[in-house]
């Protein structure tokens, strides 16, 4: 077997959706299955990295050798990620973090009242990725961008606005990105790009992790 290229490095990976509770039985979630992020954790561990995986609510087995922290909401994910980030060399944010949560969680199940609708007041969740990128001692920070249109332009804007080292952009929709075994990624970094064609998420994760190791080395040398 080829030498393990990530020996000695600590990877922190987030994966899966967040669930934002409305009342004791309902929540706002999204279609992330966690497969992309779990594949990144697995690929990094196979290359010898020490991996911590912060997982939203998903039905996936923990990859071999990976330490897993389970969370439910965006705020729980933020607390776990920020507690871990300073002692990691790389942070890969593959989680589909809910941008909004109900402004209050109803203590009892909400009841229908007549034929009327229901208005939910939402407030913004913290941006975990931007907070990690703003840490004084920050790891090498890799975001994802899930876009339904203008993939490259929107992803590059996120790379710049959040001051990331790299971003992995994917098109998402009813028939791509989420909940599938395959995906396609466009990797962007401040002065470059690389397209990773449609493939199994585990294969893409191996290519992504290899590129991260390379770019991180280039940044250190600069
Ligand atoms: O889980 P799968 O079913 O395998 O699907 C994989 C995936 C489509 C979920 C994955 O490949 C992906 O794109 N993950 C990121 C989803 C997302 O939230 O993208 P975004 O463009 O909304 O967010 C941009 C970046 O900011 C992401 O790295 C996200 O983790 C991060 N973020 C977003 C909002 C927030 N409040 N905090 C964050 O940290």
Image (cartoon, rainbow, N blue to C red):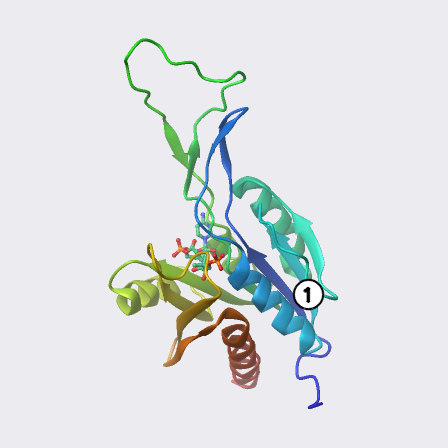
Q: Is residue 53 visible?
A: yes
Q: Which quadrant is the N terminus positioned in?
A: bottom right
Q: Nearer the viewer, residue 15 or 104?
A: 15
Residue lying farthest to the bottom in this orientation? 2
Residue 138 seen from this side? no
Which residue corresponds to mark 1?
A: 51
Question: Closer to the camera, 35 or 23?
Answer: 35
Counting from the top left corner in percent of width and height, residue 17 is at: 50, 48
Q: Residue furthest left?
A: 150
Task: Please say if 49 is above or below 119.
Answer: below
Left or right position of 179 against 210: left
Q: Tell me where residue 115 appears, x and y as whole percent.
A: 28, 12
Q: Is residue 195 left or right of residue 220?
A: left
User: Relative to 179, is 123 above or below?
Assistant: above
Q: Residue furthest top?
A: 114
Q: Residue at x 57, y 67 (%)?
A: 39
Name the spot of residue 147 as percent of width and height, x first.
Answer: 32, 59
Looking at the rendered structure, the secondary structure element under dot 1 is strand
Q: Give the side of residue 155 with respect to residue 222, left or right.
A: left
Judge by depth and name the residue closer to the eye, 44 or 127: 44
Give the number of marks: 1
User: Is residue 113 left or right of 22 when viewed as pictured?
Assistant: left
The yes-or-no answer for disc 1 within 8 Å of ligand 1 is no
Quick one: label 1, few (<14), some, or many (20+) residues within 10 Å? Answer: many
Ligand 1 visible in quadrant: bottom left
Q: Residue at x 50, y 60 (%)?
A: 94
Determine the image quadrant of residue 197.
bottom left
Q: Position of residue 101 (x, y in %)?
A: 44, 35
């Amino acid at each position: 077997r080829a030498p393990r290229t990530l020996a000695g490095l600590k990877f922190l990976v987030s994966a899966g959706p967040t669930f934002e509770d409305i009342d004791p039985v309902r929540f706002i979630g999204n279609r992330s299955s966690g497969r992309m992020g779990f594949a990144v954790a697995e690929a990094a561990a196979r290359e010898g990295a020490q991996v911590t995986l912060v997982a939203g609510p998903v039905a996936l087995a923990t990859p071999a050798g990976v330490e897993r922290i389970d969370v439910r909401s965006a705020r729980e994910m933020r607390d776990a990620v920020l507690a871990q980030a300073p002692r990691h060399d790389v942070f890969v944010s593959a989680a589909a973090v809910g941008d909004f949560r109900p402004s209050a969680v109803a203590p009892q199940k909400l009841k229908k009242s007549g034929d009327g609708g229901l208005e939910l007041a939402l407030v913004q969740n913290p941006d975990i990725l931007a907070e990690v990128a703003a840490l004084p001692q920050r790891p090498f920070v890799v975001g994802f961008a899930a876009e339904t249109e203008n993939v490259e332009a929107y992803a590059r804007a996120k790379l710049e606005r959040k001051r990331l080292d790299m971003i992995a952009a994917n098109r998402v929709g009813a028939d791509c990105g989420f909940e599938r075994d395959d995906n396609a990624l466009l990797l962007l970094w401040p002065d470059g790009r690389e397209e990773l064609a449609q493939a199994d998420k585990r294969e893409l994760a191996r290519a992504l992790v290899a590129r991260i190791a390379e770019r991180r080395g280039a940044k250190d040398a600069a």
